[in-house]
Amino acid sequence: MKRIAVLTGGGDAPGLNAVIRAVVKTAIQDCSCEVLGIRDGVDGFLKPDGILPMDTAQVRGILPRGGTILGTANRGNPFAHRLVQGGEEVIIDQSDAVIRRIQDLKLDALVIAGGDGTLNIAQRFYRKGVPVVGIPKTIDNDIGGTDFSFGFDSAVNCAMEAIDRLHTTAESHHRVMVLELMGRHAGFIALHAGVSGGADVILIPEIPFRMEAVVQQIRMRQEKGSPFSILAVSEGATLQGSRPVYASLGDEINAPRLGGIGEMVNTALNNQYGIESRLIVLGHLQRGGSPTAFDRWLGTNFGSSAVHLAAAGRFGHMVSLHGSQIEAVSLEQALAVTKRVDPHSNAVRTARAMGIYFGDEVPA
């Protein structure tokens, strides 16, 4: 390889700068290769200032930083690009323009770090002949083909710390605290943070709940001398027989945005069941801040391994973590099925054994 490029797409996540740093340093020091950074995701190929030559000096000191120095875009889909032409908004396919730019730059490989949406775009480019290597990035940990994606551990630690803090105020005021956490279709953040932080109820998309069961658990705790409860609620959690709650509907470019299940639960507790509760929506705090040691380690290993994968010509693949080993899996295989919490997994069994309820059954 003589020249490669790296870009970060989708939502930001702690550990992205570790990936960028590892790609740049490995390409230059191990492969004697020139590296270009693409600003703001794939959109950078379509901008006059979207290409940035990179060297080791530019990635010095970025390891502990959150976010991404290259910028990102979670609405940047070149296959459905929104433009204003003649005063009207139109949506066009600009993937060929991106490919021409890649060819003009004489790229031998394109390393793309992103979640399922970004990696789907990467796969479509690979099918059109672009030499793509993927890196899984999502705080939701819902990408198939890898045990963990970087960003997840940092998000879980942020959520766990929030639960720790809520315990003191909930106990002082004898209240229920409803903490809404991210997790569109997978409840890994709520499950891991809830168990680690000692939540009393965990509501996740994979286990639809009943309000009656949640209320019964809260009242049982009160009867047993625990006048407060902590509820860790994934934004994708649903009532039995209902659909997820959306803050906004999507369109041909933007995916629907979840949000509101925490408010629904909180309102029902206060108004319908007479239980005093407060709602906290952690939101984008879970995405920000310095990455944990594990996310720095994983991002670094992913970035370096992706360069070696490209050097070996294994395009159309994604780096992944299996056990303690960094391996390669095809993008097609990784994106085939969204990874979700197994309701019968050891993690869920452990939570139930600890007395944590998921709202799917009335406590005995």
Image (spheres, helix red, strand yellow):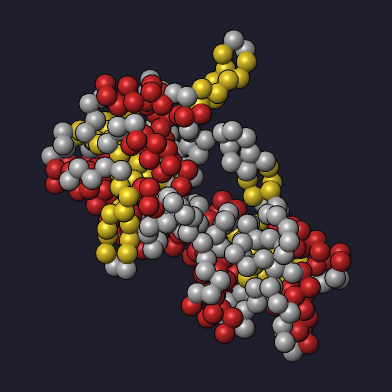
Quarter of the image holding residue 6?
top left
Q: Position of residue 149 (x, y in %)?
A: 40, 57
Decide if residue 232 is in sight here.
no
In the visual, does 124 lie left or right of 226? left
**Farthest residue, direction top:** 86
In the visual, does 155 lie left or right of 254? left
In the visual, does 262 lie left or right of 304? right
Decide if residue 130 is in sight here.
yes
Q: Position of residue 229 (x, y in %)?
A: 70, 76
Q: Position of residue 196 (x, y in %)?
A: 52, 74
Compare residues 359 and 173 and report the one nearer the observer: 359
User: Which quarter of the image is occupied by the N terminus?
Assistant: top left
Compare residues 57 and 279 and report the one nearer the observer: 279
**Residue depicted at x 50% and y 39%:** 74
Vertical relation: 352 (above or below) 84? below
Compare residues 182 and 99 and report the one nearer the observer: 99
Q: Position of residue 93 (x, y in %)?
A: 47, 24
User: Which quarter of the image is occupied by the C terminus?
Assistant: bottom right
Compare residues 239 and 106 and report the one nearer the observer: 239
Quarter of the image holding residue 351?
bottom right
**Residue depicted at x 45% and y 29%:** 78
**Residue depicted at x 63% and y 45%:** 257
Vertical relation: 228 (above or below) 80? below
